[in-house]
Amino acid sequence: MAKISPLQIYKFLPGTNCLECGESSCMAFASALIERKKKIDACVPLMEKKEYAEKKEKLIDLLTPPVKEITIGNVVIGGEEVMYRHDLTYFNPTAFFIDVDDSMPRESLIEKVEKVRNFKITRIGQELTLDGIAIRSKTDDPTKFGETVLSIYENYYMPFILCSYNPEILEVGLEIAAERKPLLYAATRDNWEAVADLALKHGCPVVASSPGDIQGLADLVQNLSDNGIKDIVLDIGSYPGGKQFYEMNENLAILRRLAIEEREKLFGYPILGVPMVAWMKEKDAVKATMKEATLAAVQLLRYCDALILHSPETWSLLPLLTLRQNIYTDPRVPISVEAGARVIGSPDENSPVLLTSNFALTYYTVEGDLQSSKVSCYLLVVDTEGLAVEVAMAGNKLTAAGVKEALEEAKLLEKVNHKKLIIPGRAARISGEIEEETGWEVIVGPIDSSRIGGFLEEKWGV
């Protein structure tokens, strides 16, 4: 599927350049719609004037993503338009749900939910968190399931997935938590009519589950759609190994290709993966956690829009959260931080001044190494358009003139009583140019920021 161009959108806009949308022109608004920085209802004439009714209808159809957006509580999944993120970008990160079940003692249940709620890791300036709880009926006892749902519902405002193949069990959970719009897992070829009735009654999204059977999944989605279900999530099965693992991997790609490249509406929905199946046969907790993380990574890379996991351990979740962060970072825009001087520790007029680029990964690595070394200093962040030092040097984005401008804007001479600047080792070749341009003495630092502590101890005596 070719990317939609601003010109394609523009022909369905009023073309009046009225500015009511907050953009400078209708063409600028068209570009903002592609980037999802604006919504179509921001165009007041299009929404309100009858003369534009036909254009509005065509524009809505054009802008509707081939993979429908589905909302679970306050989490949005799906809504993707391209197979490969370099064609545009991916918008709604894969949602991570951690499972609990109704056989757990209340104390263990609450402890795990608390861990999920409070889970937070900061990486490259972004907080990486988990998205919700999947509540499984392990006992097949409506009373126990209801008590488990109620315990979580009363104490935590988190998105839910209610998991059972028994419609009576799902109904008990919905009587308690329907207003949170939980995802119902799952409708199958055996129970879909009863589950569809529950989904319609309570206005909840539902999982269509047909493990290993794409045609069976299509038939199931067709049945649900024919009965008025609009919000569907696809489950083609999850397998941690063997021949089924390879078939799953292929099926996940087929589902997304059918949705985006073939515009097959029966498959135009988000995909659910259930890596927690790795725990079903593996008794060793460490091995199970490793298998789960491996399966989750594969499903992340194979277009899954939501995952149900079992382990809340940081060592297994951090690689997955990092992978998710990387996949859902816009590849067209370098990750950068604001330029300027940063204060590390408690510097005084005698403290060193170090320089780095504003590429986020470089900045946070250097900042972390400085803090680990317990060094008090000033860190001058130069605008390199979000490029790392070596790349910025190659692209002429880190220059002596840029360093001079950064020094002047930061007014560092008002904060220190010296004119010594420590630059990264990879910027050594412009050290002379920086000295000539700024009048500061340049000291070439280490190539690897992990050595900054020892370097400063030797050269600065800190």
Image (cartoon, rainbow, N blue to C red):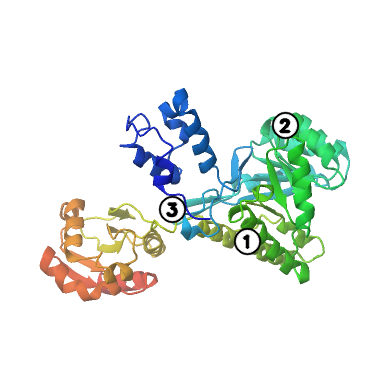
User: Quick check: 367 left or right of 269?
Assistant: left
| Residue 122 in sight | yes
Q: Which mark is residue 173?
A: none
| Quarter of the rendering containing residue 385 | bottom left
Mark 2 or mark 3: name the one nearer the start of the chain: 3
Q: Looking at the image, is mark 3 or mark 1 nearer the viewer?
A: 1
Label 2 element class = helix
Q: Position of residue 249 (x, y in %)?
A: 68, 65
Q: Nearer the viewer, residue 409 or 134?
A: 134
Viewport quadrant of the C terminus:
bottom left
The answer for how far apart the CA atoms under marks 2 and 1 are is 31 Å
| Residue 462 in sight | no
Q: Which residue is mark 2?
A: 178
Q: Nearer the viewer, residue 248 or 94?
A: 248
Mark 3 or mark 1: name the one nearer the start of the chain: 3
Whether residues under marks 3 and 1 lie with C-beta atoms below 8 angstroms apart, the answer is no
Image: 287 above or below 271: below
Residue at (38%, 39%) from the top-left corner? 29
Image: 382 above or below 444: above
Neighbor class of circle 1 (other Cα within 10 Å; few <14, some 14-19, many 20+) is many
Q: Which residue is mark 1?
A: 302
Q: Which mark is residue 125?
A: 3
Q: Nearer the viewer, residue 182 or 343?
A: 182
Q: Position of residue 192 (x, y in %)?
A: 82, 42
Q: Position of residue 162 (x, y in %)?
A: 75, 42
Image: 271 above or below 199: below
| Amino acid type for the residue under numbered disc 2 | Ala
The answer for how far apart the CA atoms under marks 3 and 1 are is 26 Å
| Amino acid type for the residue under numbered disc 1 | Arg
Mark 2 or mark 1: name the one nearer the start of the chain: 2
